[in-house]
Amino acid sequence: MKISYNYINLVALGNFNPGIVTPDFLNKVCELNLGEPTDQSPPEIPVHKRLKFKNLIFTVDMQRLEISEIGAENIYEVKIKDMFDVYYERLPYTPLSAVGVNINCELPKTDILIEKIVNPETYLDFLNAREIEIAEKSLQTQDEKTWLSSNYLIKDVRSLTRQVSISKKKDSLNINYNYEAGGLGQNKERLKLLLSGYKEFCDEFLNFVDFLGV
């Protein structure tokens, strides 16, 4: 099945100082060698910072840090995890409450695929889980009900949360596959588990696409 990746990103929730995140900080202090940004947010808005370097985007406000890579062809080769490692190493006392990684992509839309992804058993079986939380959006008329989107949340898969969000577009299905370490104020070991497990997460995502079997 052809997968078209929109972006892969890492999102951290906590307390941040957007003013710290400058091209000099990323290039010289973090030694990321990103060069000059190709686009950035207006400097007169100090509580929000957005820096774009070719296919990498850093977005920071006072409660959220997001590092995104767009246009990826190989999810194993993206640098978001490594960049967050360096950032956090330079600012180790940054209070974090949760960190998650998202793989956002498009799959070709077929009736067979929709039938499988709207079935909760798909996720319970694939992740060997006992329970799942579901939020669904649909359009109801007098004659029929049309599925539009679903969100599936499993809270404990090898000590991390999994969340799969799927929505129907004109010619494709948008999938956001997420794993997250929450409660970091009480247990920072979950962050180590998330960061060290990125390759396994990529394996899991590709295995999930294969599991859909269409």
Image (cartoon, grey):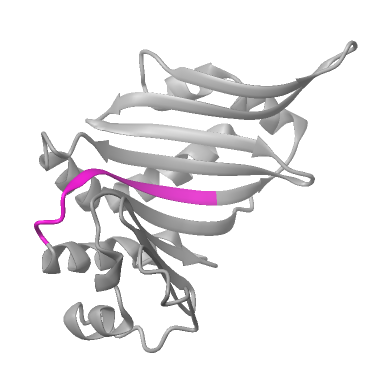
Return the residue nearer the eye: 80 or 200.
Answer: 80
Q: Residue furthest top?
A: 142
Extreme residue in the bottom direction:
36
Q: Quadrant of residue 81?
A: bottom left
Q: Is residue 30 visible?
A: yes
Q: Residue at x 35, y 83 (%)?
A: 34
Marks counted in the figure total 0
Q: Residue 52 at what x, y percent from top left?
A: 46, 75
The quarter of the picture where the C terminus appears is top right
**Residue drawn 52% across the image and 50% down it:** 104
Q: In the drawing, does residue 170 fall left or right of residue 201? A: right
**Coordinates of residue 76 in the picture (x, y in percent):** 38, 61
Per the picture, the main secondary structure of the magenta-coloured stretch is strand
Residue 129 belongs to the span the image colors magenta:
no
Q: In the displayed structure, does residue 193 sit left or right of residue 4?
A: left
Left or right: where 90 falls relative to 156: left
Residue 101 forms part of the magenta stretch: yes
| Looking at the image, residue 191 lies above or below residue 4 | above
Viewer-nearest residue: 168 or 3 = 168
Magenta range is: 92-104
**Residue, far front:** 44
Q: Where is residue 166 shown, x and y percent of the image?
A: 59, 36
Q: Is residue 214 visible?
A: no
Residue 75 is situated, as x and y percent measured from the top left of the image, at 43, 59
